[in-house]
Image (spheres, rainbow, N blue to C red):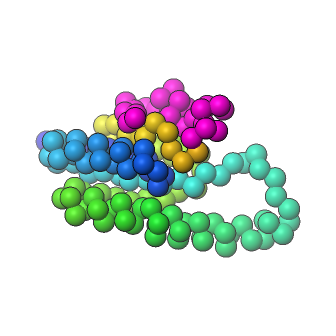
């Protein structure tokens, strides 16, 4: 029997915590399961920066990754491990939907699990959110947790 993999997107919101709780419950029910827990720092190729901002970009990126680990990902990984579930933690920069789908393909995941409304909330509802793009383009089933 092969291991089952779930990719879970978290962002520090209550919806992300509910998505992780759902994934842990499913992982325990399945048995041989690993959760790939991912925090994505969104980056848009369409933003314009000054030359000074470009010079500071690498430093800012490293600070964002460190903050994402310490505030969101590392505590979630530790809690998941304490619950007896295998977990891999990942922080990436880029488009959330593309990254979660790419991780699902890379790890041959059975599904992607995300919260319905994350920290961006209203803006996503007005302009279309990660979950909508993910459902429309993912290579594996997507479970959206309310």
Residue 63 falls left or right of residue 77: right
**Image quadrant assignment for residue 90:** bottom left
Extreme-right residue of the structure: 51
The picture places residue 40, in percent across and down from the top left corner, at 52, 53
Quarter of the image where the C terminus is located: top left
The vertical placement of 34 against 110, above or below, is: below
In magenta, the rendered stretch is: 121-146
The picture places residue 111, in percent across and down from the top left corner, at 34, 37
Residue 103 belongs to magenta span = no
Q: Nearer the viewer, residue 12 or 106?
A: 12
Quarter of the image where the N terminus is located: top left
The picture places residue 70, in percent across and down from the top left corner, at 46, 70
Residue at the image position 57 percent from the left and 41 percent from the top: 121
The vertical placement of 73 against 7, above or below, is: below
Residue 98 seen in this snapshot: no
Residue 144 seen in this snapshot: yes
Residue 32 falls left or right of residue 63: left
Residue 124 belongs to magenta span = yes
Residue at the image position 64 percent from the left and 38 percent from the top: 123
**Image quadrant assignment for residue 143:** top left
The picture places residue 42, in percent across and down from the top left corner, at 61, 51
Residue 113 falls left or right of residue 98: left
Residue at the image position 47 percent from the left and 55 percent from the top: 12
Residue at the image position 61 percent from the left and 38 percent from the top: 122
Q: Nearer the viewer, residue 1 or 58?
A: 58
How many numbered marks are there? 0
Q: Nearer the viewer, residue 82 or 91?
A: 82
């Amino acid at each position: 029997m092969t291991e089952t993999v779930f990719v879970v997107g978290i962002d520090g919101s209550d919806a992300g915590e509910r998505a992780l709780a759902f994934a842990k419950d499913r992982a325990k029910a399945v048995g041989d399961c690993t959760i790939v827990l991912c925090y994505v720092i969104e980056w848009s190729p369409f933003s314009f920066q000054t030359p000074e901002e470009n010079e500071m970009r690498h430093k800012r990126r490293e600070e964002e990754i460190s903050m994402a680990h310490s505030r969101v990902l590392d505590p979630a990984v530790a809690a998941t491990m304490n619950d007896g579930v295998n977990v891999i933690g990942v922080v990436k920069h880029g488009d959330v939907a593309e990254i979660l789908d790419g991780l699902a393909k890379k790890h041959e995941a059975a599904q992607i699990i995300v919260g319905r409304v994350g920290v961006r909330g209203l803006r996503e509802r007005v302009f279309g959110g990660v979950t909508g793009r993910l459902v429309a383009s993912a290579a594996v089933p997507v479970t959206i947790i309310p």
